């Protein structure tokens, strides 16, 4: 029966297709744009180690849970909870997930639009002959201008919608299978270039030699939030994708492969960006502008920089696209299954309304920058709340749902494909879902939010 309904709903066609789509979702701006700069901001290797700890102890168990919930229910994020826990409030988790998807894509599309614009600028050779100060104002005046970034954000959302409209296998899976290998090849070429620059080793030391005295609670919260963000967890993306995975797939193995791919690619991205930044004596804690200001600067000074700058921004755009389709699919699957819309109408409605909210995110960098909430503009507020609050709390509820509501027996049945595969890790998995993940998420979130509010209040005086 499950197989039947899956084929009506759309499903992934092959094992590689599942990996490409799920790793495509996980690997995105989070890995290439965000990971290197937050590693820079929070002090390097110490942050990386905390992040890796969260990936293993919390991320992997939550990813296995999302796949399991989705495949068992064969429904969208909201419908899955309703089906597996009828007449209980668990569906709120799915509902929050759809909301988080909506918000995340609205600012994600803006940054992806920047990446598209920078691909074109790189092609035109626009960075040539610019001083570091000129590159800074090139970026800041671009993102603050009213039309250009919105034009690119809309173009990006259009591409995203186009792929999603084609369906799970003919759209999402096909393009992920095409784009993910391209991404890996470009990344490896860039890594080679960066690591062979004179002075690159300082960047590697920054990335791999920890100094735990630099770590703050805010850094720990960001590491947790980023573990969720980077693995695409906490809002039902992988529940939705899980619902398209066939009954023979080894979900635990798939989750492990996706987690490894995401982590390795983030570290590779760090190895592209940080050695280059150090080789040219640039500040690694430059923040969100790191890849848009610092890197063009680096490319200008490096042999072959014109060519590598084009490759880099294509890489960024491709990575963003395979992630944004997964985010849009959360909303589209919800609208089409729960509100009985056709895929086409659901996609048009979701993509265009998200683009509208995104336009406000974009404008908040310039014309609407007076709208400040807790010291942050609209863009930063959406980023902060969705990544650091919605996703971890979504992950907390998903852990509790699997650990306590579904419980060990039902989880084991689904995860082992009804007894076909041996699940040696069921004990630590359930233990993490019942205790480690929820308690750690709770403590880290509360402390992190507290520290944020305190530092905001202090900034008022
Ligand atoms: N994982 C993506 C990235 O690292 O860029 C972003 C993302 C996709 C976050 C899907 C959340 C999500 F559900």
Image (cartoon, helix red, strand yellow):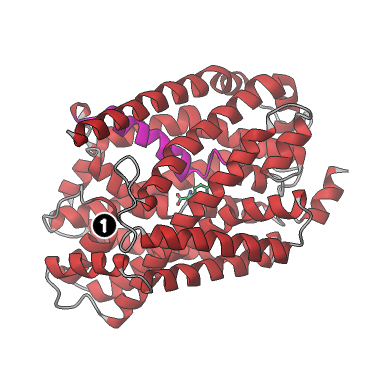
**Where is residue 421 drawn, in percent x and y?**
72, 32
The secondary structure that most of the magenta stretch takes on is helix
* Quarter of the image where one finds residue 453: top left
Camera-nearest residue between 128 and 409: 128
**Where is residue 387 drawn, in percent x and y?**
44, 42
* Quarter of the image where one finds residue 50: top left
Camera-nearest residue between 257 and 432: 432
Camera-nearest residue between 135 and 368: 368
**Where is residue 435 drawn, in percent x and y?**
53, 17
Residue at 71 percent of width and 25 percent of height: 412
Residue at 63 percent of width and 52 percent of height: 331
Figure check: 184 above or below 90:
below
Q: Is residue 223 magenta?
A: yes
Figure check: 213 above or below 170:
above
Figure check: 308 above or below 55:
below
- Which residue appears farthest toward the bottom when viewing the image? 124
In this figure, which residue is indicated by the disc labeled 1?
289
Q: Is residue 218 magenta?
A: yes
* Quarter of the image where one finds residue 257: top right
Residue at 62 percent of width and 33 percent of height: 65
Secondary structure beneath dot 1 equals helix
Figure check: 427 above or below 303:
above
Residue extent of the magenta highlight: 214-235
């Amino acid at each position: 029966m499950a197989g039947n309904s899956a084929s009506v709903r759309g499903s992934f066609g092959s094992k590689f297709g599942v990996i490409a789509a799920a790793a495509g979702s996980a690997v995105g701006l989070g890995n290439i744009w965000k990971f290197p700069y937050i590693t820079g901001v929070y002090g390097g290797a110490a942050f990386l180690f905390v992040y890796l700890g969260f990936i293993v102890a919390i991320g992997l168990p939550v990813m296995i849970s999302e796949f399991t919930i989705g495949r068992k229910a064969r429904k969208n994020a909201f419908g899955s909870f309703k089906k597996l826990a009828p007449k209980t409030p668990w569906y709120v988790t799915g509902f929050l997930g759809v909301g988080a998807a909506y918000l995340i894509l609205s600012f994600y599309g803006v940054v992806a639009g920047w990446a598209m614009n920078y691909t074109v600028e790189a092609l035109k050779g626009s960075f040539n002959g610019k001083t570091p100060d000129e590159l800074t104002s090139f970026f800041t005046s671009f993102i603050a201008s009213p039309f250009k970034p919105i034009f690119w954000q809309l173009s990006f959302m259009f591409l995203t919608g186009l792929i999603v409209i084609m369906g799970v296998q003919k759209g999402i899976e096909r393009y992920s299978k095409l784009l993910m290998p391209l991404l890996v090849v470009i990344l490896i070429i860039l890594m080679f270039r960066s690591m062979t620059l004179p002075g690159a080793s300082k960047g590697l030391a920054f990335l791999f030699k920890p100094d735990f005295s630099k770590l703050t609670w805010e850094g720990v919260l960001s590491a947790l939030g980023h573990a969720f963000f980077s693995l695409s967890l906490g809002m039902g993306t992988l529940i939705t994708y899980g619902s398209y995975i066939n009954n023979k797939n080894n979900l635990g193995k798939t989750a492990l492969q996706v987690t490894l791919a995401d982590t390795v690619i983030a570290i590779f991205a760090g190895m592209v960006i940080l050695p280059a930044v150090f080789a040219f004596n640039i500040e690694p804690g430059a923040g969100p502008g790191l890849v848009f200001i610092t890197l063009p600067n680096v490319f200008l000074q490096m042999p072959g920089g014109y060519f590598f700058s084009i490759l880099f921004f294509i890489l960024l755009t491709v990575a963003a696209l395979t992630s944004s389709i997964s985010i849009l699919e959360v909303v589209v699957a919800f609208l089409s299954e729960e509100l009985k819309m056709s895929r086409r109408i659901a996609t048009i409605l979701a993509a265009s309304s998200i683009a509208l909210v995104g336009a406000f995110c974009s404008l908040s960098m310039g014309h609407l920058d007076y709208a400040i909430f807790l010291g942050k503009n609209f863009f930063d507020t959406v980023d902060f709340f969705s990544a650091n609050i919605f996703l971890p709390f979504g992950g907390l509820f998903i852990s509790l749902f699997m650990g306590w509501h579904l419980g060990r027996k039902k989880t084991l049945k689904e995860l082992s494909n009804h007894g076909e595969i041996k699940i040696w890790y069921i004990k630590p998995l359930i233990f993490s879902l019942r205790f480690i993940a929820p308690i750690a998420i709770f403590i880290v979130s509360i402390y992190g939010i507290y520290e944020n509010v305190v530092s905001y209040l202090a900034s008022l005086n």
